[in-house]
Amino acid sequence: MKALVVFICLFIQLTFAQKELKHQVYFLTDQYEIPETEESRLLLFLSEIENLDIQKISIYGFCDDRGSDSYNMILSQQRADAIKEVFSNNEFDESVITNVDGKGEILLNVVNDNDLYKIRGLNRKVEIIVQPYDPPREKVEQPKKETTEELLKGDLKEGDKIQLENILFRTGYSYLTKESKSKLDEIAKILVERTDIYFNIEGHVCCTHGSRDAIDRKTKKRNLSLARAKTVYDYLADKGVKRYRMKFVGQRRKFPLGGEPEFDRRVEIVVTRVIKKKN
């Protein structure tokens, strides 16, 4: 009976462990800036988890055995904070990050003297643990409302704001998906015909600190909302919408919607001028 209980406990632990995804980021001695190669590995990991329904993320910083306890606690916390900032800069919802803790040093477990340098290098790290929902939660159905096309065809006035539905962006990037392009083709046809309106194209991002912009992973610049607006601007212009009728603006994270993060990665049209038709 005792053996059966032990087996069940081990099975539960293994099942739970399989749901977790882990990633380590390694640091140079006395440093909390992320090395370039490690940042590239981290961004690749973010790409792998960005479409998961994440329940929580834990970030733990560590140091090797050198340095005082107080020094190592501070440095390990700085390393954990640096990783959290990368999540924020790349539009990950901070509300799922439940732990950002510096754990200080990891005790050495040296088999022989030749292992010392290697082990210390492996101990200078941050460990990221991602716990997805399993199974993923069902998405809440959004209430039906007028489509983007219906709004653009209707009566418009200066100041009207229209969200471009289904023109969604991958986390951290400004390029359009194939599905977005087909949707934007329909919007372009309407805007080509509606020569009576001038408008701004406003890009938005999610999840950054305060009203900061996010980093465009392609260019490494902190102007992702502007890059998204310009992508749509250029696409509409290529489809025949006159450039003099449009401007593009990056709104950073000044106007979060308060719902799912994906809806803050959005582009909106704001009408700036309506030319009244002569009778």
Image (cartoon, rainbow, N blue to C red):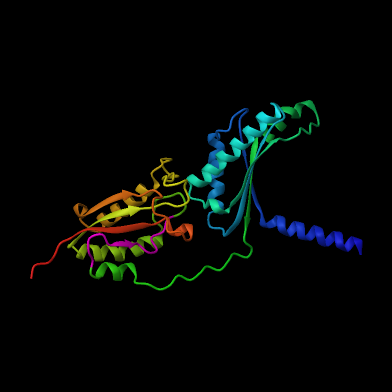
79 vs 264, left or right, is right
Residue 164 belongs to magenta span = yes
Write the residue at 45% across / 54% down: 170
Q: Which residues are magenta?
A: 156-169
209 vs 194, left or right, is right
Write the residue at 62% across / 61% down: 133
Q: Give the percent coordinates (x, y) of residue 194.
A: 20, 64
Write the residue at 57% across / 54% down: 96
Q: Give the percent coordinates (x, y) of residue 268.
A: 33, 58
Number of marks drawn: 0
Camera-nearest residue between 230 and 88? 88
Residue farthest toward the bottom in the current orientation of the protein? 144
- Residue 56: which quarter of the image? bottom right
Residue 1 belongs to magenta span = no
Q: Give the percent coordinates (x, y) of residue 187.
A: 29, 64
Residue farthest toward the right in the current orientation of the protein? 1
- 225 above or below 276? above
Q: What is the quadrant of the N terminus in the image?
A: bottom right
Q: Give the percent coordinates (x, y) of residue 215.
A: 44, 44
Q: What is the quadrant of the C terminus in the image?
A: bottom left
Camera-nearest residue between 11 and 105? 105
Q: Main structural element of the magenta stretch: helix, strand or loop?
A: loop
- Residue 222: which quarter of the image? top left
Camera-nearest residue between 243 and 249? 249
